[in-house]
Amino acid sequence: MDNNELLDNLKLIVGDTQVRTGEPMNIHTTFRIGGCADYYVQPSSIEELQSLIRFLNKSDIECCVIGNGSNLLVSDKGIRGVVIQLSDTFDEVEYIDDVTVKVMSGMMLSRLGNKLADKGLAGFEFATGIPGSVGGAVRMNAGAYGGEIKDIIVSADVLDRSGRLISLSRDELELGYRTSCIAAMDYIVVSAVFRLQKGDTDTIKALIKELAVKRRAKQPLEYPSAGSTFKRPQGFFAAKLIEDAGLKGVSVGGAMVSEKHSGFVVNTGNATAKDVCMLTDMVKDKVKQQSGVDLELEVIKLGDFS
């Protein structure tokens, strides 16, 4: 299939305005880093997404799915094939009962948290300040300030790579520390059901504000980043290990270990993916030498890093 035929098929599935070619990925990630995607597609319904997945699978065309791009490092070479983005059009909420909601995977956690607060639903405050979407949060079992997605999730609907819709219970999702079965099975999250508790709107909003103040005080939100760069090693804190190795403020090109919170690698303005990789490799090596601990990236890489 040549490029024109592929483009025509993509437009036929999702519409002309929902397909772009040569799309710069640095505008779609919170790191503000990355080359161009060959094709960038935004389906507006589960049915369109299913048709798209089935077509790409049948045609043996590479594809990846992103949400808000908040936990991603995209290669400077860009991404071959098709990038499917769900955050802007998959953002509906259904109130199932007084404490249970079903949310499309593209909804931003901040938007959902504020909607739930307005409804007097408590239990989502911990996630409201995380700069990601529901789909990514489920995939990574996102957490902060003592809460995790696994504490409130009931189930998730996912697509497999044949376009089949599957409902997974909380236990079937196999939620662990920043992990689930989603990545291992190459599933695509399309929605999630959360069970919360009734609460007082003013109290909920006050807690959201309190956590936002803490986040601003401790995290380098003034710079683009992908959030916490490394997973927390069992029995340790990545930031302390990095700081103890003398790496706070160390930089490679435009990438720097944050002087505010050494668990973050930030883009000081002109960082490349190569800069980030060189810096994170250096951090892993020096922490290993200093403490014997192997750090593992929490950030997901997309594209060719060879």
Image (cartoon, helix red, strand yellow):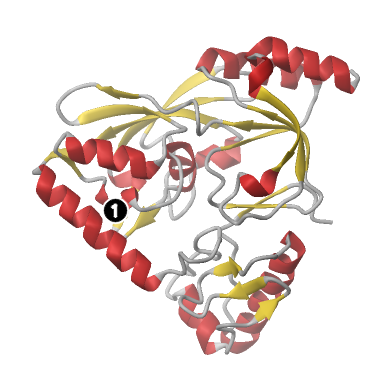
Residue 208 position, x and y percent, is 24, 53
Q: Amino acid under label 1?
A: Phe
Residue 301 position, x and y percent, is 67, 52
Q: Which one is in front, 259 or 288? A: 259
**Residue ID for mark 1:** 126
Q: Number of callouts in the render? A: 1
Q: Which one is in front, 187 or 41? A: 41
Mark 1 secondary-structure assignment: helix
Residue shown at 50%/31% (left/top)? 88
Q: Which one is in front, 17 or 159? A: 17
Task: Please indicate whether residue 298 sits to the left or right of residue 110 in the image.
Answer: right
Q: In this picture, is 72 found above or below 99?
A: below
Classed neighbour count for the residue bearing mark 1: other residues with Cα under 10 Å, few (<14), some (14–19), many (≥20): many
Q: Which one is in front, 62 or 234? A: 62
Instruction: Name the image quarter holding the C terminus.
Output: bottom right
Say if residue 196 shows up in the picture.
Answer: no
Residue shown at 44%/76% (left/top)? 236
Residue 55 position, x and y percent, is 72, 15
Say if residue 260 shows up in the picture.
Answer: yes
Residue shown at 57%/88% (left/top)? 245
Task: Please indicate whether residue 80 sits to the left or right of residue 25 in the image.
Answer: right
Q: Residue furthest right?
A: 2
Instruction: Name the image quarter holding the N terminus.
Output: top right
Q: In this picture, is 37 found above or below 104?
A: below
Q: Residue furthest left?
A: 200
Task: Please indicate whether residue 272 sits to the left or right of residue 257 in the image.
Answer: right
Q: In this picture, is 288 found above or below 130?
A: below
Residue shown at 48%/44% (left/top)? 180
Residue 181 position, x and y percent, is 51, 40
Q: Dividing the picture into quarters, in which one does residue 154 lie?
A: top left
